[in-house]
Image: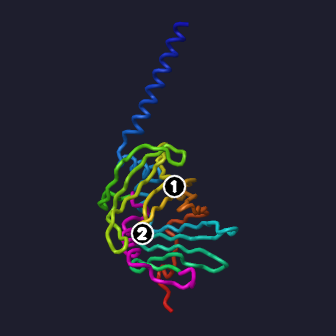
Amino acid sequence: MKTLAFLSFLLITFSSLAQEELIETMYNQTADEIITKYIDRTGGIEAWSEIDAIKTKGSFTQGDLSVPITIYNTRSGKQAVVFEYNKKKVTQMAFDGATMWTTNFLTMEPEISSDDMRKNMLLKRNDFPSPLLHYRENGYKAEYISTVAKNGIVAFKIKLTQEPKFVNGEEVPNESFYFFDAQNYYPIAIETTQLGQPVSITMSDYQEVEGLYFPFTISQGGQPIDVKEIILNPEIDYSIFSFPEN
């Protein structure tokens, strides 16, 4: 009985020490360590650096309709969001590296975006495929804030500060908060602002695509997008980024 009691004491002691070590590990990591683990566990810096463009195909729900959507992102900074509505393709947003434009949903005509939006899009040219990938080289600052509960998950909260962005023609701080799952280091949420308005993005259902891991369920402002396919380095008709000339 004494032997059993001693073994039980050892198990409890080792279990407590393991829990203490786990807690210490969770609460004493730096932002750099967390971001490095995120990059490593989603494919590694070399694999991410080989990507020049990403084409994401999915759908979102509008009323009773499932609306197909395609998102293009390129290393050169060109971006586009195109969806299909009533069997017609509509460009929600496009940027050719110099000009940003959208579709006016009242007139269904293309129109040039505001100068603030254009300047802010220009700032993102160094952020493909994620501003976290080369944040130090780009002069960004990452800071560990705390370990918190986010969407029912224990998460590391990281504050990322980038170069100032523009709102109403004035430079304002450009800060975002990233939340990383403490178990696998995948980002599960981002809290930021766009044109002075708070924006919340959630990501889940990570899946492998050619050795890299991407979220296949994304929600922004409560609007979920169900990703169907992600194509790396796809063939792209670059005219989709250009403002239509009448």
Q: Position of residue 166 (x, y in %)?
A: 35, 70
How far apart, in angstroms, are the residues tagged by discs 1 and 2? 30 Å
Q: Residue at 50% across / 56% down in the picture?
A: 212
Q: Is residue 48 left or right of residue 87?
A: left
Verify whether residue 75 appears in magenta.
no
Q: Position of residue 71 (x, y in %)?
A: 53, 70
Instruction: Report the front residue among 52 and 113.
Output: 113
Q: Nearer the viewer, residue 203 or 97?
A: 203
| Mark number displayed over residue 195 | 2
x and y, in percent, of residue 207 in the image: 56, 54
Mark 1 neighbour class, 10 Å CA radius: few under 14, some 14 to 19, many 20 or more: some
Residue plotted at (53% across, 58% down) = 210
Which residue position is annotated with label 1? 213
Region rendered in magenta: 104-132
Neighbor class of circle 2 (other Cα within 10 Å; few <14, some 14-19, many 20+) is some
Q: Which mark is residue 58?
A: none
Task: Write the residue at 55% across / 53% down.
Answer: 204
Q: Relative to 241, is 135 above or below? A: above
Residue sitting farthest toward the top: 2
The answer to the question of whether label 1 and label 2 lie on touching residues, with beta carbons closer than 8 A, is no
Q: Amino acid at mark 1?
A: Tyr
Q: The disc labelled 2 sits on which kind of residue?
A: Leu
Is 152 rendered above or below residue 232?
above
Name the quarter where the N terminus is drawn.
top right
Pick the front one: 195 or 161: 195
From this view, report whether residue 73 is shown above or below residue 151: below
